[in-house]
Amino acid sequence: MDKRAIRRFQKQVWDHYRAHGRHTLPWRTHITPYRILVSELMLQQTQVDRVVPKFTAFIKKWPTVSAVSKATLGEVLRMWQGLGYNRRAKHLHECAKIIMEAHSGRFPKDQQTLQTLSGIGPYTAAAIMNFAYEIPTALIETNVRTVFLHHFFPDATNVKDVDLVRYIELTMDSDKPREWYWALMDYGAYIKKQHGNPNQRSRHYTKQSPFAGSDRQVRGAIVRALAKGPLSKDKLEQLVQAKTRTQFRTQLESLCQEKLVNKTGNRFTLP
């Protein structure tokens, strides 16, 4: 790709961002590594519109990593209700404790060390590097992938992320990586609405299974019920209404093993 092609692509992305960027998203102001971490964990497999009020309430209650590290996991899980995938809340809580205890309350500034923390994989580490520290780092997620599939692989199928990364690195605006990736994400969201989802042509695309009746739904229902207070197994099963007793008991046992639910005597509670 020559320099003129790179500049044309960058101009198209920047022009869209200036005209249509989601500049009011709350995690795009008062930026700290902690706020970026909270937003990225919340945004995993959850729509932006659902995350905005949850992020705002969460940050109001626990504005710093120190504050959330002092909360109980049960408190964090209660605040998390409505987002689903409760393991993310547990990872966030564990990560906060590790940062306070092992890193003197400071987030690491290198990608490798970040990935040693609970819940932080390659993408979230790259997000913190770009958004919190403005250190240019190759980053790929669903909307970024959308942009590069749409522009550079319009007819290809089974495209690997490693093939996209080359273009991501070539076209990156290294002077403004934070806003550049925001611009890419907003442009990718626009492309999906206008042209459909090109991620289906990615080798890494997995269609999400139906939520109704799934183990995910049962797990979420158990945690949601317990967020209101302790319950016996019989009462909990009655409230959850799983497809089968086996499904309910399997998911309850799994939540206990993961320490997302505690059992005390004949009653179950959040930690």
Image: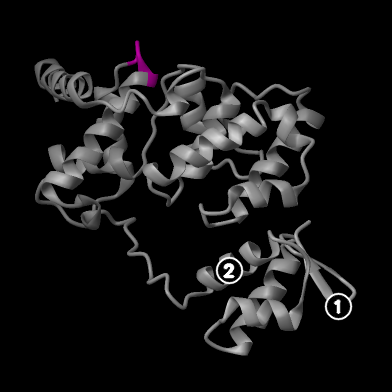
State which region is magenta. 174-178
**134 to 253, vertically: above or below:** above
Residue denoted by label 2: 221
Instruction: Classify mark 2: residues with Cα within 10 Å, few (<14), some (14-19) or many (20+).
Output: many
> Residue at left 62%, top 89%?
245
Q: Please, which residue is most extreme toward the right here?
A: 265
Q: Secondary structure at mark 2?
A: helix
Instruction: Classify mark 1: residues with Cα within 10 Å, few (<14), some (14-19) or many (20+).
Output: few
Q: Position of residue 101 (x, y in %)?
A: 81, 31
> Residue at left 20%, top 26%?
20
Number of marks: 2
Q: Residue 56: within the magenta?
A: no
**Left or right of 161 in this view: 9:** left
Quadrant location of the N terminus? Answer: top left
Quadrant location of the C terminus? Answer: bottom right
> Residue at left 19%, top 51%?
198
Q: Position of residue 227 (x, y in %)?
A: 68, 59
Q: Nearer the viewer, residue 19 or 100?
A: 19
**49 to 261, vertically: above or below:** above
Q: Position of residue 194 (x, y in %)?
A: 12, 45
Q: Can residue 22 be seen by looking at this rendering?
A: yes
**97 to 214, vertically: above or below:** above
Q: Nearer the viewer, residue 62 or 44?
A: 62
Residue denoted by label 1: 266
Q: Please, which residue is most extreme toward the front here?
A: 228
For marks 2 and 1, give the CA distance: 19 Å
Q: Say which quarter of the image contains residue 220.
A: bottom right
Q: Give the amino acid at mark 1.
A: Asn
Q: Position of residue 44 (x, y in %)?
A: 46, 47
Q: Give the amino acid at mark 2.
A: Ala
Q: Please, which residue is most extreme toward the top here?
A: 175
